[in-house]
Image: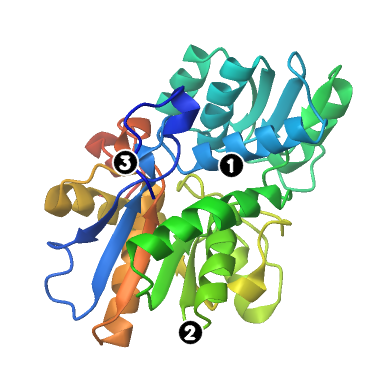
């Protein structure tokens, strides 16, 4: 990685995020845990990487042109990243989001003039109007519409194979025993895993999935369970999706909303890191792993976004009490 003194535009500020050692929260452990601060990307999340890569690749291959409308479903971060890319490159953006999205994300998206399609988060996955089903239909019905499809388009994985993975390998100087990441679209965990395992097949990759999602049960039993609502944003799904390649994942831990959110708050208290809920989830999983291994191993993980998108929820004691977490 070569530090740039001047960036040509905001997209040039995507990538090369810091990887830091966690010291306070790990004091009693033999393992060293390192976190890649993806909220240091230009629009504040790991999703900046895929928005830039996928749009630019579609442009180069002639699938889209300025003036077209990009459509995708998002838990907020991809939508914000796409809003940045679309604003600079001259595209319109329609985003399908669940109606339980944090108010901060909705305000950010409105500030970026994104056209929002709000979907009832309690709709069953088989409903034609569910979160996963409606976006491709909207793209088909929109003149010059292009469905990015971050959940199934393996260009998502490619973005991390080409950027996040190499950065982690270089920053860790090739000394990695475990990589821990949430399983959302699957792009981050599978793209990074593919790169790291090509460098060192001995690296183990651990995924984190919320209670209510289907990935944990499918990974361990190959059975599809009925999904149920959960509060943690950005992780899990109600369907099997194309970007999740289970062959690149060695184990998946399951986490409750409570464990994820309390760990998120603990990160702020002990490490002065104001991260989002998925970061609390990966931190919880990294600590669980470190205790189980009980050896001086090196664990790298991802902190995908920051507290700025969850001040009314995870960082709000009244909200946590309302949800039975405090």
Question: Does 53 appear above or below 96?
Answer: below
Of marks 2 and 3, the one in the foreground: 2
The image quadrant that residue 310 belongs to is top left
Q: Is residue 218 visible?
A: no
Q: Are marks 2 and 1 in contact (CB under 8 Å)?
A: no
- SS state under label 3: loop
Report, in whole angstroms, how far the alpha carbon at label 2 lies from the one at label 1.
Answer: 27 Å
Count of labels shown? 3
Q: Are marks 1 and 3 in contact (CB under 8 Å)?
A: no
Q: Is residue 109 left or right of residue 168?
A: right
Q: Which residue position is annotated with label 3?
A: 314
Query: Is residue 205 or residue 169 the one in the foreground?
Result: 169
- SS state under label 2: loop
Disc with the residue nearer the chain's start (2 vs 1): 1
Q: Which residue position is annotated with label 2?
A: 202
Query: Is residue 299 or residue 290 the one in the foreground?
Result: 299
How packed mark 2 is, by other alpha carbons closer than 10 Å (few <14, some 14-19, many 20 or more), is few
Residue displayed at 48% across by 53% down: 164
- SS state under label 1: helix
The percent position of residue 131, horizontal first and vertical second, equals 69, 38
Disc with the residue nearer the chain's start (1 vs 3): 1
Query: Is residue 114 or residue 194 the one in the foreground?
Result: 194
Disc with the residue nearer the chain's start (2 vs 3): 2
Question: Does 299 appear above or below 162?
Answer: below
Residue displayed at 59% across by 49% down: 159
Residue displayed at 36% across by 40% down: 39
Residue displayed at 72% across by 25% down: 70
How packed mark 3 is, by other alpha carbons closer than 10 Å (few <14, some 14-19, many 20 or more), is many
Disc number for residue 36:
none
How packed mark 1 is, by other alpha carbons closer than 10 Å (few <14, some 14-19, many 20 or more), is many
Report, in whole angstroms, how far the alpha carbon at label 1 lies from the one at label 3.
Answer: 26 Å
Disc number for residue 50:
1
């Amino acid at each position: 990685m070569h530090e740039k003194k001047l960036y040509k535009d905001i997209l040039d500020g995507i990538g090369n995020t810091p990887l830091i050692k966690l010291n306070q929260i790990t004091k009693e452990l033999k393992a060293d845990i390192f976190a890649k601060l993806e909220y240091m990307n230009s629009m504040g999340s790991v999703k900046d990487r895929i928005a830039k890569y996928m749009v630019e690749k579609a442009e180069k291959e002639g699938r889209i042109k300025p003036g077209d409308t990009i459509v995708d479903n998002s838990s907020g971060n991809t939508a914000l990243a796409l809003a940045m890319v679309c604003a600079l490159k001259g595209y319109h953006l329609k985003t399908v989001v669940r109606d339980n999205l944090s108010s901060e994300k909705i305000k950010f998206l409105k500030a970026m003039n994104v056209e929002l399609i709000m979907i009832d988060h309690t709709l069953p996955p088989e409903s034609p109007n569910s979160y996963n089903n409606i976006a491709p239909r909207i793209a088909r019905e929109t003149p010059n519409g292009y469905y990015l499809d971050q959940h199934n388009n393996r260009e998502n994985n490619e973005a991390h194979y080409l950027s996040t993975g190499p950065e982690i390998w270089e920053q860790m100087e090739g000394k990695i025993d475990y990589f821990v990441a949430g399983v959302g679209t699957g792009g981050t965990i599978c793209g990074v895993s593919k790169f790291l395992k090509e460098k060192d097949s001995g690296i183990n990759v651990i995924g984190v999935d919320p209670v209510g999602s289907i990935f944990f049960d499918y990974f361990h039993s190959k059975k599809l369970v009925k999904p149920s609502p959960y509060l943690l944003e950005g992780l899990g799904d109600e369907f099997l999706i194309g970007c999740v390649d289970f062959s690149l994942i060695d184990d998946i831990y399951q986490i409750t909303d409570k464990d994820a959110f309390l760990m998120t708050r603990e990160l702020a208290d002990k490490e002065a890191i104001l991260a989002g809920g998925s970061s609390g989830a990966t931190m919880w999983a990294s600590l669980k792993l470190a205790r189980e291994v009980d050896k001086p191993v090196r664990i790298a993980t991802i902190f995908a976004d920051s507290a700025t998108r969850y001040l009314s929820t995870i960082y709000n004691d009244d909200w946590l009490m309302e949800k039975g977490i405090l």
